[in-house]
């Protein structure tokens, strides 16, 4: 999966399943655009993404997570809850403010 840290007033941690990068999903008026410029940072193994998530949950960060594997990883770590997950055209996503 890809992880990209976007430095801002409140850092953004963008995490996406590798195969979703560059794709767009539509459902009614809703759109999910998994832009390379936003999500494609560094390709990492799940263990490495886990360490990044653990670090950034201690900071003032916002998480944007897209894809079944990435969402499941956040669920398994307990930083994300089922009721926080949306879906567009079957693709799960979540925005998490910590």
Image (cartoon, rainbow, N blue to C red):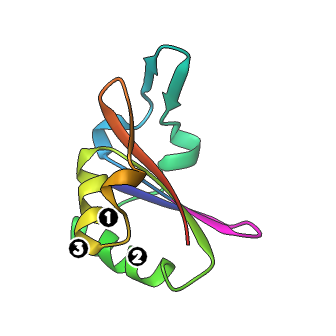
The residue drawn where x is 52% and y is 24% is: 31
Circle nearer the N terminus (1, 3): 3
Q: Which residue is mark 2?
A: 52
Residue furthest out toward the front: 83
Query: Looking at the image, is mark 1 or mark 3 nearer the viewer?
Result: 1
Residue beneath disc 3: 47
Q: From the viewer's side, name the closer residue of 12 and 2.
A: 12
Q: Which residue is mark 1?
A: 74
Q: Residue at x 25, y 45 (%)?
A: 68
**Local crowd size for mark 3, using a 10 Å CA cut-off: few (<14), some (14–19), many (≥20):** few
* Res 4 label: none
Q: To which quarter of the image does residue 50 belong?
A: bottom left
Q: Is residue 42 magenta?
A: no
Query: Magenta residues?
Result: 6-13
> With respect to residue 86, does 63 lie above or below?
below
Say few, some or many: other residues with alpha carbon within 10 Å of mark 2 (under 14 / 14 to 19 / 20 or more).
some
**Cβ–Cβ under 8 Å for marks 1 and 3:** no
**For the residues marked 3 and 2, what is the alpha-carbon distance in whole angstroms?**
9 Å
């Amino acid at each position: 999966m890809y992880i990209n840290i976007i430095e801002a007033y409140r850092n953004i941690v963008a995490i996406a399943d590798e195969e979703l990068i560059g794709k767009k999903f539509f459902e009614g008026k809703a759109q999910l655009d998994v832009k390379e410029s936003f999500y494609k940072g560094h390709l990492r193994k799940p263990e490495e993404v886990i360490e990044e998530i653990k670090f950034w949950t201690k900071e003032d960060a916002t998480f944007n997570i897209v894809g079944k594997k990435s969402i499941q990883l956040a669920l398994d770590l307990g930083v994300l809850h089922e009721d926080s997950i949306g879906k567009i055209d079957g693709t799960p996503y979540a925005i998490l403010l910590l």
